Image: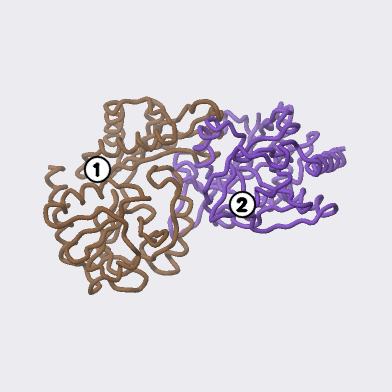
Chain colours: A purple, B brown
């Protein structure tokens, strides 16, 4: 496995950051995570655009062009012995910072094996647990996933696949996934106080051709009317949700519209990765 | 400058962590910061107790005894060429983690020069700006200071020394300081949804001998009745606050009771560091 760090490509075990870095000392940094299909980077421009937007919000300069980043990303992926390559990008606060001054960020890319999920998650759907919480600066993909990891014992205890955040009665997202429901043939997904995923964007574009689509506040109580539900993310694509807080969504099986979306997405990916 | 990393003492520039560490990738880690007076570590046991408590909340094991940590801390401080030595402790999520498994934390201590503040901050007092915000897991001293650093441009724009967080109409803390007011000879400090500082604890113990002391919810509107205000932290000790949101506290000068507390604290420190 290879990494890119400030212009150099190294073995992952030789890459390191110093103890003065602001990511280590203050959790200050942004990241993004791109995947491949058939070894081709998927929607990498969208990930780079979001990465730059996150960096800008935290005043971190990314001194590489998209072309430079993409070239090095491809070198990393080709040079790494990975079955299903994915790429983690991190931009840290760096070693030097004064409240009145500038950052000197460290830019890191890491080639990684894409995580996989059991096939039954897709055929039977997964369970979620609602949890009242609003992430800090959710529109910035920062490295702060403190609460996500902290909640792992709760996931195990309640035997759920993931947590579904809501706040002031509106559903937002899972810590690493976007959330969608079908209610009466309308596809609804929360719009504000969350991170807009790349897969979310692709799904919205595809769905628009077949159903009415609404990006808006989704009240917690609306889950009672939901016929189908699913989550999306770079690593999970479209994963059906059949139970939330012990209550079945629809009849508790993977719905026809979700199945159709999964097929549309798979076709799109096939087309892309040919 | 020296650092301690997983049992070894090194020059700070030779210390590093690998790119797989969960602090770098997910902002997952806890820290603490202890200072010296006259080169003697101040209330180090209190810092260690809080550090262990924070680590426990994030399920991170600290596999060193207080005696081992203290011995290495003193070696670091003695071996570093620092005028005013201070010590940063960091416990990271480490390189290996599975949602169902354990962490393998990296334990780091760094000898640092204590930051100093202009004398006029103490003789004239500083300005604060109120800001609606509730930190994530505030009782855990995690490395997450994303919002603190993000707000630096606001501090500069408004020409204030620091931000004072409030939430649901109660004042909590500054990002790195506790907050106190005197109202009619009663010393009041917020109790919940904040990090309990070591200096806060010392100040409460000292103040108890001279005034009525209340740890409770402090409403934002009560600032209008405040005769005096100050902040406390390890690096700042007791720093008077004379203006909040462009409104003077009392007559806008450093109050007599705050002056008395500063003198009591200085005497306590002299006694300690003799």
Question: How far across and down, in percent of the image, does residue B269 sit?
Answer: 16, 47
Q: Is residue A230 above or below residue B102?
A: below
As rendered, which of B244 and A97 lies closer to the eye? B244
**Structural distance between the alpha carbons of marks 2 and 1:** 55 Å
Q: Label 1 is found on which chain of the structure?
A: B
Q: Is residue A106 left or right of residue B2?
A: right
Q: Residues within 10 Å of mark 2 (few under 14, many from 20)?
A: few
The residue to which callout 2 is attached is A221
Quarter containing the N terminus of chain A: top right
Q: Quadrant of residue A244?
A: top right
Q: Is residue B257 above or below residue A19?
A: below
Q: Residues within 10 Å of mark 1 (few under 14, many from 20)?
A: many
Q: Which mark is residue A67?
A: none
Question: Helix, strand, or loop for circle 2?
Answer: helix
The residue to which callout 1 is attached is B36
Question: How far across and down, in percent of the image, does residue A31 sit?
Answer: 60, 45
Could you tell me if residue B180 is visible in this image?
A: yes
Residue at the image position 53 percent from the left and 29 percent from the top: B95
Residue at the image position 23 percent from the left and 40 percent from the top: B43
Question: Helix, strand, or loop for circle 1?
Answer: strand
Question: How far across and down, in percent of the image, does residue B146 sit?
Answer: 48, 51
Residue at the image position 60 percent from the left and 30 percent from the top: A12
Q: Is residue A258 above or below residue B217?
A: above
Quarter containing the C terminus of chain A: top right
Residue at the image position 27 percent from the left and 44 percent from the top: B35
Q: Label 2 is found on which chain of the structure?
A: A
Could you tell me if residue A63 is visible in this image?
A: no
């Amino acid at each position: 496995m290879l990494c890119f760090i400030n212009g150099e490509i190294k073995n992952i075990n030789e890459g390191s950051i110093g103890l003065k870095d602001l990511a280590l000392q203050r959790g200050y940094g942004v990241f993004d995570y791109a995947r491949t299909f058939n070894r081709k980077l998927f929607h990498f421009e969208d990930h780079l655009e979001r990465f730059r937007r996150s960096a800008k919000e935290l005043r971190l300069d990314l001194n590489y062009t998209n072309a430079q980043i993409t070239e090095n990303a491809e070198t990393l992926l080709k040079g790494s012995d990975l079955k299903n390559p994915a790429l983690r990008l991190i931009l840290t606060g760096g070693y030097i910072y004064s409240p009145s001054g500038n950052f000197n960020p460290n830019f890191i890319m890491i080639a990684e094996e894409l995580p996989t999920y059991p096939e039954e998650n897709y055929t039977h759907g997964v369970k979620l647990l609602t949890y009242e919480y609003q992430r800090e600066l959710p529109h910035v993909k920062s490295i702060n996933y403190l609460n996500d990891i902290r909640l792992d014992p709760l996931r195990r205890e309640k035997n759920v696949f993931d947590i579904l955040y809501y706040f002031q009665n509106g559903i937002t997202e899972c810590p690493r996934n976007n959330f969608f429901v079908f209610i009466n043939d309308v596809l609804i997904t929360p719009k504000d106080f969350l991170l807009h995923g790349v897969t979310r964007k692709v799904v919205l574009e595809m769905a628009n051709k077949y159903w009415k689509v609404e990006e808006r506040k989704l009240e917690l109580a609306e889950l009672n009317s939901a016929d189908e539900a699913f989550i999306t993310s770079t690593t999970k694509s479209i994963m059906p949700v059949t139970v939330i807080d012990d209550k079945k969504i629809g009849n508790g099986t993977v719905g026809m519209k979700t199945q159709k979306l999964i097929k549309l997405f798979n076709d799109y990916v096939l087309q892309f990765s040919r």
